[in-house]
């Protein structure tokens, strides 16, 4: 399962860089699980949040897919790779000071 995990993470990294790497057939169910979970990802003020354990458990229950710990490890590895790429280039603090107008617009 570790080799499949490495292959799937490599495909994800390639695709995030604009490539067109193919998902190994053996990894399609886990790839599809990750993409469905990632589509429901929540976002906070600082950007995307990791896929929560509860979301993985709820997805598996709703889809009636008996996830094993090794499957969850692969999904989490994909999510970590996605988060590492998704957070790049994002400013950690605002580039301009907060004006009263901007504050009013944000909380109104």
Image: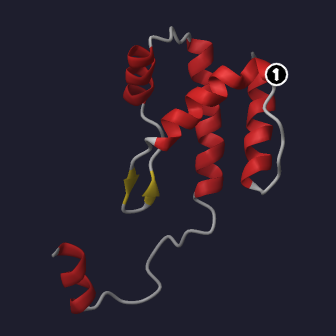
Q: Quadrant of residue 99?
A: bottom left
Residue at figure coordinates x 58%, y 48% from the top left: 83
| Coloration of the structure image | secondary structure
For mark 1, does the 10 Å Cα neighbourhood hold few (<14), some (14 to 19), or many (20 or more) residues? few
What residue would you read off at disc 1?
3
How many marks are shown on the rendered structure? 1
Q: Eyeballing the image, is 95 above or below 57?
A: below
In the rendered view, would you say 5 is above or below 81? above
Q: Secondary structure at mark 1?
A: helix
The image shows residue 3 at horizontal and vertical percentages of 82, 21
Residue furthest to the left in view is: 108
Q: Position of residue 36 (x, y in %)?
A: 52, 34
Give the x, y percent position of residue 6. 79, 30
Answer left or right for 108 relative to 89.
Answer: left
Q: Which quarter of the rendered picture does the N terminus lie within?
A: top right
In percent of the image, x 66 and y 43: which residue is there?
81
User: Residue at (36%, 89%) from the top-left corner?
Assistant: 97
Asked whether the viewer can see residue 2, the reply is no
Q: Is residue 59 left or right of residue 101?
A: right
Could you tell me residue 91's position as x and y percent? 53, 73
Quick one: 57 or 87, which is closer to the camera?
57
Which of the pair 20/98 is nearer the observer? 20
Q: Which residue: 15% across, 76% down?
A: 108
Q: Is residue 19 above or below residue 40?
A: below
68 up-or-down from 54: above or below: above
Q: Can the viewer see residue 21 in this picture?
A: yes
Residue 64 appears left or right of 1: left
């Amino acid at each position: 399962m570790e080799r499949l995990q490495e292959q799937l993470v490599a495909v994800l990294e390639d695709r995030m860089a604009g490539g067109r790497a193919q998902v190994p057939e053996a990894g399609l169910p886990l790839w599809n699980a990750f993409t469905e979970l990632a589509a429901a990802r929540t976002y906070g003020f600082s950007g995307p949040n990791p896929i929560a354990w509860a979301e993985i458990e709820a997805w598996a229950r709703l889809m009636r897919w008996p996830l094993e710990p090794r499957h969850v490890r692969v999904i989490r590895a994909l999510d970590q790779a996605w988060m590492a790429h998704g957070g790049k280039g994002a400013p950690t603090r605002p580039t301009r000071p907060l004006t009263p107008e901007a504050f009013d617009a944000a909380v109104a």
